[in-house]
Amino acid sequence: MSSKKDAIVNIGGFIAFKEESDFQHAWIYEILFEGFITYGGMAGRDMNALAQGLDESTEFDYLETRIKQIEYLGKRLTEFGIPVQLPYGGHAIFIDAKKCLPHIPKEQYQAQTLAVELYIEAGIRGVEIGTILADRDPETLENRYPELEFLRLAVPRRVYTNNHMDVVACAMKNIIDRKDSIKTGFRITKELPMLRHFTVELERI
């Protein structure tokens, strides 16, 4: 589990096992790659914050506020006719980029194009969950095109108000209103053989 989401901390994570045998098999590799079993490469203060965050993240008042804020953003987007994945997520809204930009060819990365447009429109950072993330076929080295192309809008916890969610929704509406002016998507100019989702460089076609 990444602790940066619902454990309410800035860094860290953990692996949990139901079976003792699985734990015994895995922990030696944890030492090789992360740090000793008692800290896993994390500073003591970060482990303390993680423990506190895990405790607070089970409080119903916190959970209700968190989930309702995501729901609020989803409903605002829906009111503007922006297609989103249902049901709404617990930490993010997933916008259907194929439906938002149907005129952009899949080879030009629809979800990435939408992410760039949102940043240009309002300085809001989302992330592509689509073809770039799906990476290339290891045999043919051709792009794999998933059925769905999403723009993920993950909302940091305890940072923004619903007024900020209104800004996000209005920015997306502005993009949809001017979508015909978005003539092209992007091409890859540089990618590493692994994890291109994090390292790729692109340019507008």
Image: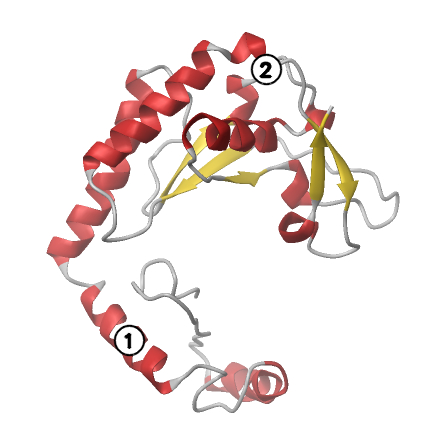
Q: Quadrant of the N terminus?
A: bottom left
Give the quarter of the image for residue 28: bottom right
* Mark 1: secondary structure: helix
Estimate how packed mark 1 is, as few (under 14), some (14 to 19) or many (20 or more) residues with alpha carbons within 10 Å. Answer: some
* 118 is higher (above) or lower (below) than 201: above
Q: Amino acid at mark 1?
A: Ala
- Observer-nearest residue: 24 or 186? 186
- Observer-nearest residue: 180 or 151? 180
Q: Is residue 70 left or right of residue 127?
A: left
Q: Percent x, y for residue 123?
A: 43, 35
Q: Evaluate whether residue 148 shows in this view.
A: no
Q: Percent x, y for residue 23?
A: 50, 84
> Residue at the spot x=50%, y=83% of the render?
41
Q: Amino acid at mark 2?
A: Ile
* Mark 2: secondary structure: loop
Mark number displayed over residue 182: 2
Q: Residue furthest left?
A: 61
Instruction: Judge depth for marks 1 and 2 and give the one in front.
Output: 2
Q: Is residue 137 left or right of residue 113?
A: right
Q: Which circle's residue, 1 or 2, is located before the other in the chain?
A: 1
> Residue at the spot x=70%, y=50% of the render?
196
Q: Percent x, y for residue 84?
A: 41, 27
Q: Residue furthest right?
A: 140
> Residue at the spot x=25%, y=50% of the render?
159
> Residue at the spot x=31%, y=74% of the render?
50
Q: Which residue is mark 1?
A: 49
